[in-house]
Amino acid sequence: MRFLKQLQLENRFLLKNWFFLLAPLIYGISMALWMSNQNQAATNILGQYTSGFFKTNNEFLAIGHTLSLGVLFLASVLSIRREKQTVLLDWTNSLPNSFLSIILAKFLSLVIYSGLFTLFYFLVFLWQGSSYGKDMYYLLEHGLTFSIQSQLSYAVTISLGMVLAVLISNRIVYIIVFCAWMFGTFFMEGYIIQRYQLHFLKTFHLNQFFMDVSHSEDWGYRISRKETLYSQLFVMFFSLFLLAITIMKSSTNRISSFEKRKWTFFGLVTALTIASFLPYGSLWADRLGHYNFLKAGAVEQIDPEDGTLLDTVGEFYNVDSYSIKMERTAKNSFHVKAELVIPNLKDNTPLNFSLYPSFEVESVSWNGVKTDFKKEHHLITVSDIDQQESNRLEVEYTGSLNEWGQVYGRERNFAFFKKEDMYIPSYIGWYPLPGDYPIYTLFDVDTEDYIHTIGFNRHIELNQALPTSDFQVELINFNHHIFSTAHSSKKTADGVQIFTSENAKGLTLFSNKGLVENRGNLPFSVIAHKENYQIIQQKLGDMAAIEDYFQSWLDEEFQKDLKLVYIPSLDYVGTETYNSNHFDEALFFDDSVQTYVQVDDGKVINNTMIDLKSRLMSFWLFRHESLNHYYEGSEDSVLRGLLETYLLVLYKDYYGFDWNDFEQFNGTDFYYLSTVSHINWMSSSADMNTLEKFDELMKSYKLQYNNQVVLMVAKEWEKGNKEEIKKLLKEIYKDIKTNNKDSFTYEEWMTYWNRTFESGGMR
């Protein structure tokens, strides 16, 4: 009863202050305004990307929750100093309560008060989440998780504020607490954790909602649950440890007959706090040890002398086919038997192949005979091989994947295989890659020091260098549906999932809750969440008609094995440098990315889907050759500009674009196509006609060959030579496809051009 009276007294002292009374309400209103504004606004201040619900929520918590911690810091200090700084409250020292009950009452009062912040947050979370279209199960699951994390952050903040107020008796404690608030949030994150990559210290961060959080509401959220629980366990006991110090220091002011009991209690709390850190510390010790192992085998990607990019891909030999059986042997591990059919290599040099560094190779067989091998990190070498016309390489190995890393100071997970979450990309070498291909590259410049799998478009270089092969992959003991970049898939009666591809560059496996794969009315398969699948069907519903349009004048069949993988969390797996990624036979696009562009009249329009559609058509028309612009071997190649001329004809002829409409391609990867919209604002006179504007643009500026190709086609189209342009592009298309060209020079282009426009065309 006396404790309850003390608790009631503390609550009264706290809530009679208008600042503390209104702070939780202001917190809730601020969150509601933040969430609703982000939901209604088309773009952020940079006009580049919009935020989804999960990201918007975390962005608010990064700032709003940090500010609320400052309120709790102030309240906790005042609760300890209240009797000391106010003479009228000296009478509270005469109450028949022990310092234990007094401190506990103050702590509980502040925890209850902090619960008002959490309650307002939870209610706004449910309200705004529904306006973003989230279902109640999602909102309750994530809302409760965030609320628990908020309360633990408040608890450790209250304990820290109280212990500082007890240990520092004069008014300088307010400055010290302010410094502790800043150090435990902004300074720790920006200067210590991110700058020096000390991510294991984040459990000591007062605000666990990091500002650089990956905003992954599925893969990242679920895979990090174990670490989050370990961190929360330690934070809870650390809060009790700080509270125990407060009680111990306060009790020294009064003579007590329970001295031994007091120190026993303090020792027990200290021991429990140390013990609670062991799971978290062990997790990070294993994680960093594995990361350092991967880092030891990484190769330099940047020349330390001149800063240029080094060639880290190398050369590969041909593999006719892969036959792979992957069996799940435990919850998070697997056994693989891979069989490669390799044509005669024409030399008897040692055979090399690359495999993920942490996989344990059990055996290697060559043409049915087990052979010795040497493994150095990723590279496996087999010597003394007797070749036949067609050779069979068999490799058996086991492994698991949970490949934590950090890029630009932000945590990533390059590949993982955990319960029903899986991301196993082809570029990590989960099956033998034919040649010496280092899986990781090292980037060590100034303060940046990290390893990466696909930095600087390395996955595209790999895609170009790899030979095509046939794939058959069988997954055994997988109880959930697996998605892939394979051309086709089926499931047998006994639950084995089989994926096959012909003439493919690789095969990637992944799974995520809520994904569906369907073709619908599209000429290719789409893998996306159910709600996004409907959007894709609506926005890209005319792709079948576009296919018919191109076939009507190109007289070519296009590849039908392309897949669109429209999923979230691509930044979580290390692809945040790119909005979209070509892996194997699929285009990966992060569904949280929405790009915008401002056009001439000041209107801001969403150009995400036109960009995505153009990427799909590029891969449709030229497959892997469409990626050559990322690292063309010859500066004279105009393959990229040539590709965009086919898109120009499509948007002019099929969609009826005006030249100004090509402004929509500003900010996309199709920057040569956007150039045609510049004829108005780059012309010297408004009295010029369109042809004169094209002439001035091409003559007055030193344009790249790719730009010139696009503008030449645009000018002839404006002149009305539409059929001639189509005939020209058809001949070039047949040349590229028939001769399997991965480059097309400007001289070749001009040969075709002059032959088509012997008079009247641009030379």
Image (tube, rainbow, N blue to C red):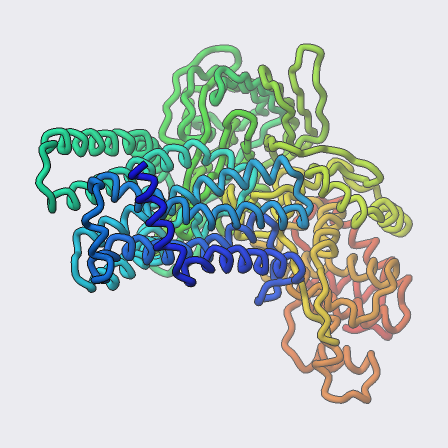
For this rendering, which residue is in front, 626 or 292? Answer: 292
Image quarter for residue 496? top right
- Is 83 situated left or right of 611 in this image? left
For this rendering, which residue is in front, 585 or 112? Answer: 112
Residue 187 showing in the rendered view: yes
Q: Going 38% across and 57% down the picture, which residue do you hit?
A: 71
Q: Going 41% across and 45% down the picture, which residue do you hit?
A: 112
- Is 606 situated left or right of 275 in this image? right
The quadrant the N terminus occupies is top left
For this rendering, which residue is in front, 750 or 206? Answer: 206
- Is 577 situated left or right of 541 in this image? left
Residue 296 showing in the rendered view: no
Image quarter for residue 748? bottom right
Above or below residue 178? Residue 102 is above
Q: Going 64% across and 31% down the picture, which residue do you hit?
A: 484
The quadrant the C terminus occupies is bottom right
- Is 526 situated left or right of 479 in this image? right
For this rendering, which residue is in front, 425 or 381? Answer: 425
Please provide percent x and percent y for residue 638: 67, 60
Please provide percent x and percent y for residue 164: 22, 52
Please provide percent x and percent y for residue 455: 48, 48
Number of disc labels? 0
Above or below residue 329? Residue 65 is below
Q: Going 51% across and 54% down the picture, which residue do you hit?
A: 59
Image quarter for residue 321? top right
Above or below residue 712? Residue 97 is above
Please provide percent x and percent y for residue 478: 59, 19
